[in-house]
Image (tube, helix red, strand yellow):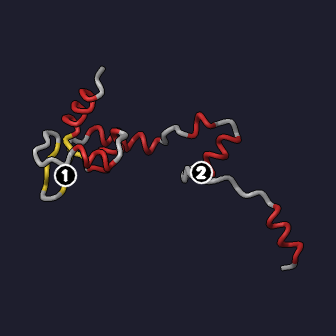
Amino acid sequence: MNKNDINIIIDQQLPPADKKEKGAAYYAEMIKAGMAEHANDPSPAKVTNLNKLKEKKLLTVNEAAELFGIGRNKIRELTNDKDCPYVIWIGSHRRIKREAFEKFISELFAV
């Protein structure tokens, strides 16, 4: 490989970021292409996952965070009390009662 070969490799345009990764490079490409409004569209797999979570009676902290759009630390903070009405404790593991937590959230943010 000589010096001219190296320049050719450096001058080549890099391929766009893989859409599945949805990293910063992908969003930058979307903005450049004028498609920023489509960059945050949920993928069909994510929509399917959320639909499955809506059917579950008990959720883990991570599942509740994904379903309700609340951070995991905030959910842990809201559910730390052993007598919390929307939590079931299984040993040291907490499971969030989806319907009761939905009701709590809707009452919390009701106008």
Examine the rendered structure and indicate whether residue 111 appears above or below residue 71.
above
Q: Which mark is residue 24?
A: 2
What is the distance, in whole Å, between disc 1 and disc 2 at their CAs? 34 Å
Q: Position of residue 20 (x, y in %)?
A: 54, 51
* 79 with respect to 2 (left or right): left
Examine the rendered structure and indicate whether residue 23 appears above or below residue 1.
above
Examine the rendered structure and indicate whether residue 13 appears above or below residue 9.
above
Quadrant hosting residue 96:
top left
Quadrant hosting residue 9:
bottom right
Q: Circle 1 is placed at which residue position?
A: 94
For badge 1, the amino acid type reads Arg
SS under mark 2: helix
Residue ID at (25%, 50%) = 60
Q: Residue extending furthest left?
A: 83
Q: Position of residue 15 (x, y in %)?
A: 70, 56
Task: Please identify the quadrant where the C terminus is shown.
Answer: top left
Mark 1–mark 2 contact, CB under 8 Å?
no
Residue ID at (29%, 38%) = 54
For badge 2, the amino acid type reads Ala
Circle 2 Cα neighbour tier, 10 Å, few/some/many (<14 / 14–19 / ≥20): few
* 44 with respect to 93 (left or right): right
Residue ID at (32%, 42%) = 52
SS under mark 1: strand
Q: Position of residue 80 (x, y in %)?
A: 19, 49
Task: Please identify the quadrant where the N terminus is shown.
Answer: bottom right
Q: Residue extending furthest right?
A: 4
Earlier in the chain: of badge 1 and badge 2, it is: 2
Q: How many marks?
A: 2
Residue ID at (25%, 47%) = 77
- Decide which of 74, 66 is in the foreground and name it: 74
Circle 1 Cα neighbour tier, 10 Å, few/some/many (<14 / 14–19 / ≥20): some
